[in-house]
Amino acid sequence: MSSVESVLALVRPDILALAPYSSARKEAKGGRVWLDANENPETPAAGQPLFNRYPDPQPPDLVAKLAALYGVTPAQCLVTRGSDEGIDLLLRTFCRAGQDAILITPPTYGMYVVAAGIQGAKVVKVPLLRDQDFALDTEAVLKAVTSEVKLVFLCSPNNPTGGLLARDAVLKVVRLLAGRAVVVVDEAYVDFSDQPSLATEIPANPNLVILRTLSKAFGLAGARVGTTIADPAVIAVLQKVIAPYPVPVPVVLAALGALSDEGLAAAQRSVATLLSERARLAVALAKLPAVKKVWPTDTNYLLVEVPDSAKAMALARGTGVIWRDRSKDVPNTIRITVGTAAENDETLEVMSRV
Ligand SMILES: Cc1ncc(COP(=O)(O)O)c(C=O)c1O
């Protein structure tokens, strides 16, 4: 079996056999008079000339721009409604309800468990090593991957702890699980780190899937644009499961704007500002009496330990400042997003009163 075939062997057999819905827009090529999709020939509301037509299921110009941004080929990319949809698609594609499982490394992003719950997949947990700055427990992960485990979710940089997982450790897991499980590396925050993405490792490792998003560094959380990057054969299977028209026309326009030369330059400036604010906030928070620890971060947030997180959260909420209590992941911790300079000043002001 080739390594790509061994990845496809992990897909739910019923999905492999599925004939996907073939949308009118997918079948139509080179048309002139569009009477195939029961659309309105006009947009009744003025000023919105494109919105009467269904979008291209995967708009080629957007896919090409995302592929260039991520240093991969268009055939390796699937545009989704945020990377959350990528997580959901992977669960539905690889895990049979009541039979298969995913592996996660808590504390980590909550949607993996939610998507598993919706799909009826079991969850195997191998905690990150807290006393080693939440490093990956490589040997324990490898040991815990039974034949039930189809997907291993690794979040790097990790939410909520903020640090990157060591590249070598992740690649070791990917290599040793070839033919046994798909390793999904969620890189939602990698734009804020100084480490390159692992996406370039996909050709050598077809069981590696990368998740990227425009929600963070590109400031497009409201538009919902994620990219699942994988071997083209894996992308082809995910295409069977995704909704026929996942990327609405206004979203395509917003994403193309963000990926234009000016958009890319603006995102770069925004990341640079957030990184300098992150450094300022981390140093200033660490000096406050109420702050016991600020974890090192490669993201746009800080995980902060305080003596009593519920009390600190309540005080902040009373002033209209909303942080995220992460105590259920790591006792007495609060996750604080890096905001504007003025917003960060508010965080510091509130924390100084805790
Ligand atoms: C680690 C991680 N992955 C994925 C997502 C989802 O992002 P998106 O907006 O692309 O769905 C988030 C959102 O906060 C996240 O923290």
Image (spheres, rainbow, N blue to C red):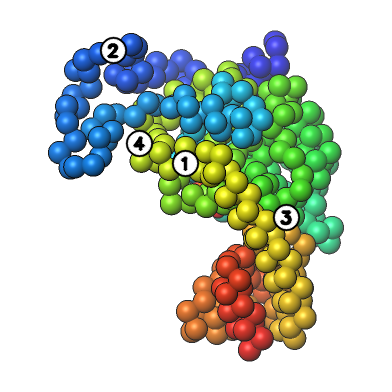
Q: Position of residue 343 (x, y in %)?
A: 56, 73
Badge 2 vs badge 3, beta-carbon distance below 8 Å: no
First in sequence: mark 1 vs mark 2: 2
- Res 11 → quadrant: top right
How far is mark 3 from mark 1, CA to CA? 26 Å
Q: In the rendered image, which residue does mark 4 sit on?
A: 249
How far is mark 1 from mark 4, CA to CA? 12 Å
How far is mark 1 from mark 2, CA to CA? 27 Å
Which amino acid type is marked by label 2?
Gly
- For discs 1 and 4, the disc positioned in front in the rendered view: 1
First in sequence: mark 1 vs mark 4: 4
- For discs 4 and 3, the disc positioned in front in the rendered view: 4
Badge 3 vs badge 1, beta-carbon distance below 8 Å: no
How far is mark 4 from mark 2, CA to CA? 19 Å
- For discs 2 and 3, the disc positioned in front in the rendered view: 2
Q: In the rendered image, which residue does mark 3 sit on?
A: 298
Which amino acid type is marked by label 4?
Val
Which amino acid type is marked by label 3?
Asp
Q: In the rendered image, which residue does mark 2 sit on?
A: 31
Q: Quadrant of the N terminus?
A: top right
- For discs 1 and 2, the disc positioned in front in the rendered view: 1
Q: In the rendered image, which residue does mark 1 sit on?
A: 257
Q: Position of residue 126 (x, y in %)?
A: 72, 49
